[in-house]
Image (tube, rainbow, N blue to C red):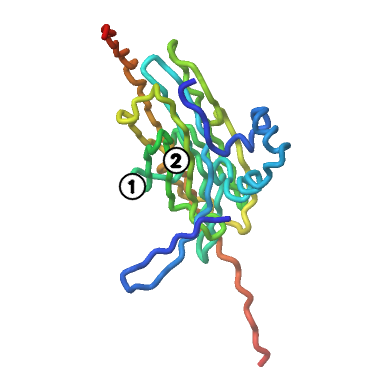
Amino acid sequence: MLARFNDNWSLMNPLRGINGIQKELLGLFDDFNDNLNRYRAGYPQMIIEDSDKELTVKMALPGYDAKDMDIEVVSDFLTVRAERECPVLKSDEKVLHHERAFGKFEESIKLPVKVKSAKVSANYANGVLTITMPKEEVEKPRSIKVG
Amino acid sequence: MSDIVKKENKAGEVTKIEYIEFAPPSDVVENHTGIVVLLDVPGSTTEKLAVNVKDRVLKIEADTDLVKNGRNVRYKRSFQISDAIAVDKISAKIKDGVLRLELPKAEPAKVRKIKVTTE
């Protein structure tokens, strides 16, 4: 193998090498704790930003195609469907390490407020899908004075 | 826990930038000409990426505009590479949040013959 891994990913991998397990058992827990604190594997899946007038949902979808995405908003439910195709290997290619996920997914979330589904806009750039949803105006309480 | 970097702005005030670090998932594929490393770094762009090789360790650092729990998301990962890779020919490309690193194999080292003479 030409490239050897020298990082902390293996900690998250249930199929991690025997060496790693042995190290932990041999009492090298200092290293182990450090890894847990410092590293998170993967990337943030979804970030929801809430402002006065709109809700913004950001989803990390690296390497996806905008045309394979399907976004649905009904009242206060958001559904996102997308697909990332698995790359086809050429005859001379050989996989040495595989962590990235491929295939279809569907994610449904309940939004904290109702949104104007007709005015929802979406944008895909640099592997991040940003969905902007203007909030539905909430009926304000009216105070009535007794004359 | 997190990486705190102090940055000085024009007014001389020191502002803290806190990062939340992620080790991005990667794929490694070998072909005839070399090795291809693919990393998922959503939200990163060419200006925010730093790829460097030092002492045969390939280090990738990518910043993003994404904010998670009040901290900027940063991707960090390093790989140790063997002598069979031509370090000076490594190239990197990014598209839709997927970083593609191409590590070409080095020409096989030439064997230097030493002639033995009698004293």
| Horizontal side, residue B37 vs residue B107: left or right | right
Label 2 resides on the chain identified as A
Callout 1 crowding tier (Cα within 10 Å): few <14, some 14–19, many ≥20: few
Q: Quadrant of residue A35?
A: top right
Q: Is residue A96 above or below residue A6?
A: above
Q: For the point 51% across and 20% down, which residue is it?
A: A95
Is B101 left or right of B113, judged from the image as shown? right
Estimate the x, y position of residue A37 in percent, counting from the top left. 62, 50
Structural crowding at the residue carrying mark 2, measured as other residues with C-alpha within 10 Å and reported as few (<14), some (14–19) or many (≥20) = many
**Residue closest to the eye, A94 or A100:** A94
Q: Camera-side residue: A31 or A87?
A: A31
Q: Using the image, name the chain to which the residue with label 1 belongs.
A: B
Give how far across and how far down residue A133 sits, in percent: 51, 54
At label 2, the amino acid type is: Gly
Between A107 and B18, the one nearer to me in the picture? B18
Query: In what element is the residue under mark 1?
Result: helix
**Helix, strand or loop at mark 2:** loop
- Residue A76 image offset from top left, x and y in percent: 62, 52
Q: How many marks?
A: 2
Question: Residue A127, which numbered label?
Answer: 2
* Residue extending farthest front: B119
Q: According to the image, label 1 marks what residue?
A: B47
